[in-house]
């Protein structure tokens, strides 16, 4: 199976925010997916709030989902950023509907 940005995004859409129980993709937390040299992948993402204590849970779930498509944990890099800061505007219509917004 060839690992593509589309495939990675699809697997990331299976990762749920532990508090809201909505996909991190639908929440707009994933800013960028990059396929790097040596089969490495870099995921640039944010959290709903600075200092959110749940990143380690989200990170482990991401690694677990990406492992199912053959991407080993040591090949995944994370860049956690708050620039630009997350806002509800980044949410998909599906996520807004789930939250009644």
Image (cartoon, rainbow, N blue to C red):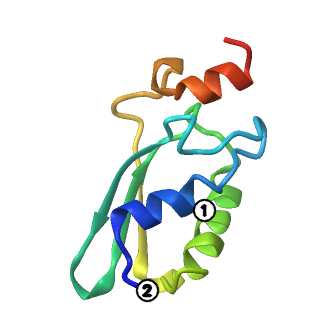
64 to the left or right of 80: right
Question: Which residue matches tag 1?
Answer: 59
The tag earlier along the polypeptide, 1 or 2, is 2
88 to the left or right of 96: left
Tell me the mark number nearer the camera, choosing from 1 and 2.
2
Q: Secondary structure at mark 1?
A: helix
**Image quadrant in which the N terminus is located:** bottom left
Tell me if mark 2 has few (under 14), some (14-19) or many (20+) residues whose alpha carbon lies within 10 angstroms of its own. few
Q: Secondary structure at mark 2?
A: loop
Location of residue 66 with respect to 32 vertically, above or below: below
Question: Distance of mark 1 from mark 2, alpha carbons?
Answer: 23 Å
**Image quadrant in which the C terminus is located:** top right
Seen at 77% across and 41% down, the residue is 21
Q: Nearer the viewer, residue 78 or 66?
A: 66
Q: Residue furthest front?
A: 1
Question: Which residue matches tag 2?
Answer: 1
């Amino acid at each position: 199976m060839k690992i593509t940005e589309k495939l990675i995004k699809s697997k990331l859409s299976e990762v749920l925010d532990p508090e809201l129980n909505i996909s991190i993709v639908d929440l707009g937390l994933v800013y960028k997916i990059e396929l790097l040299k040596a089969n490495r992948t870099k995921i640039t993402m944010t959290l709903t709030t600075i200092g959110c204590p749940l990143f380690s849970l989200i990170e482990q779930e991401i690694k677990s989902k990406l492992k199912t498509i053959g991407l080993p944990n040591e090949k995944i890099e994370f860049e956690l950023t708050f620039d630009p800061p997350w806002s509800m505007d980044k949410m998909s219509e599906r996520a807004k509907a789930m939250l009644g917004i």
